Image (cartoon, rainbow, N blue to C red):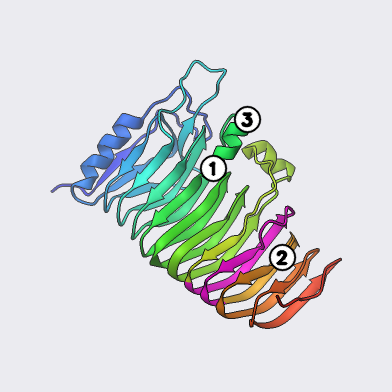
């Protein structure tokens, strides 16, 4: 009887190894291609897997690790080493109905997109770390602002139990229905969630930090810039947000939650710390905001919104209606 899974073992047993001298690209791609014939699972045993090029995941395939602290897919580059940088700028390219679960995806090189996916995509129990090694170069910083860490197009997207550290748009969705994000921690220098022309969005229990100046984060992941790091909804419908905390948006470019041309937006239990605006809506209809705690920032700005239970801590400006 033909198995519907393949088990891979790493060349490097330590999942925190930089993997700069390991190249498992060909054998991983071969295993994925084999499972694509039957919609099977590629299981990655504990350890680090060094990669040098794009991994393509066809429709219906599952990538499964032993845990985000145990299995690590690493694209790595140090200029002072003798190893060439990865040959790609897009790293994990997924088809329809793909699942990526219980592993870490680490990119320490320049990138356009870390993970791209289509309808039916599930990202569960995953840590994504993306830091271009030469992040201080102006050309790289400008380019990264246009990049995406998890970029999806289509319906039925699930992102749960994830930690995302990176420069660029962390979770980007467009042109579809039914997005669920839950139990997410996002540290970024740009947007936390960006949804465009999407219907049916649920975000629950999300923690977003914009200015990553806490020493442990900065030392481990190289994140320094002040960020937008907001939840952004452009031309969306039926958006439900609950149990959200956003910290350190000191640039004031966007609010913790920003919506434009969005119908039926509800916000329930939002905490903001050092954020220019907690909620900012333009050209939206049927907006309700309940249970907002504002610490060192402004309140809610929305035409005709239903607003209740807003608390201010520290030095703030009172609630305002645009």
Q: Nearer the viewer, mark 1 or mark 3?
A: 3
First of labels 1, 3 by sequence position = 1
**Residue at 74%, 54% in the rendered image:** 250
How crowded is the residue under tag 2: few (<14 C-alpha within 10 Å), some, or many (20+)? many
Picture coordinates of residue 195 (x, y %)?
Answer: 49, 62
Most common SS among magenta residues: strand
Q: Which residue is mark 1?
A: 129
N-terminal-most mark, 2 or 1: 1
Q: Is residue 260 above or below residue 11?
A: below
Q: Residue at x 35, y 31 (%)?
A: 25
At 44% from the left edge and 65% from the top edge, which residue is drawn?
A: 197
Count neighbours of disc 1 (C-alpha within 10 A) and say few if under 14, some if 14 to 19, many if 20 or more. Answer: many
In the displayed image of the protein, which residue is found farthest to the left?
1
Please tell me the numbered disc located at residue 277: 2
How far is the residue under mark 3 from the one under mark 2? Answer: 30 Å
Mark 2 touches mark 1? (CB < 8 Å): no
Residue stretch in magenta: 237-265
Look at the picture and state if 227 lies above or below 197.
above
User: Sequence-wise, which precedes: disc 3 or disc 2?
Assistant: 3
Residue 273 screen position, x and y as percent:
75, 61
Magenta segment includes 244:
yes
Image quarter in which the C terminus is found: bottom right
Q: Residues within 10 Å of mark 3 (few under 14, many from 20)?
A: few
Q: Give the quarter of the image for residue 246.
A: bottom right
Q: Nearer the viewer, residue 158 or 47?
A: 158
Q: What whole-number distance in Å separates the C-alpha atoms at marks 2 and 1?
A: 28 Å
Q: Tag 1, which secondary structure?
A: strand
Task: Name the residue beneath numbered marker 3.
Answer: 137
Residue 118 visible in image: yes
């Amino acid at each position: 009887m033909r198995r519907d899974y393949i088990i891979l073992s790493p060349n490097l047993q330590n999942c925190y190894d930089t993997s700069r001298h390991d190249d498992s690209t060909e054998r991983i791609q071969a295993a994925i291609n084999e499972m694509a014939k039957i919609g099977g699972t590629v299981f990655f045993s504990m350890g680090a897997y060094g990669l040098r090029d794009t991994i393509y995941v066809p429709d219906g395939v599952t990538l499964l690790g032993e845990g985000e602290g145990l299995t690590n897919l690493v694209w790595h580059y140090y200029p002072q080493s003798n190893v060439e940088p990865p040959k790609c700028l897009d790293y994990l390219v997924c088809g329809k109905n793909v699942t990526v679960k219980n592993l870490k995806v680490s990119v320490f090189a320049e990138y356009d997109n870390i993970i791209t996916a289509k309808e039916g995509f599930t990202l569960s129990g995953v840590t994504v770390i993306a830091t271009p090694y030469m992040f201080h170069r102006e050309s790289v910083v400008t380019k990264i602002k246009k990049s995406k860490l998890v970029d999806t197009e289509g319906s039925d997207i699930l992102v749960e139990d994830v930690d995302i550290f990176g420069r660029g748009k962390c979770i980007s969705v467009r042109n579809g229905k039914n997005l669920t994000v839950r139990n997410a921690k996002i540290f970024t220098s740009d947007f936390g969630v960006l949804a465009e022309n999407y219907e049916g969005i649920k975000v629950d229990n999300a923690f977003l930090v914009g200015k990553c100046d806490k020493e442990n984060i900065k030392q481990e992941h190289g994140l320094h810039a002040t960020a937008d790091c907001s939840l952004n909804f452009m031309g969306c419908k039926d958006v439900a947000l609950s149990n959200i905390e956003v910290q350190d948006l000191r640039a004031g470019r966007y609010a913790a939650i920003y919506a434009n041309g969005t119908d039926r937006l509800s916000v329930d239990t939002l905490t903001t710390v050092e954020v220019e605006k907690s909620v900012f809506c333009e050209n939206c209809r049927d907006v309700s905001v309940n249970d907002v705690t504002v610490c060192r920032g402004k309140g809610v700005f929305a035409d005709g919104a239903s607003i209740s239970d807003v608390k201010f801590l520290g030095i703030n400006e009172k609630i305002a209606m645009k």
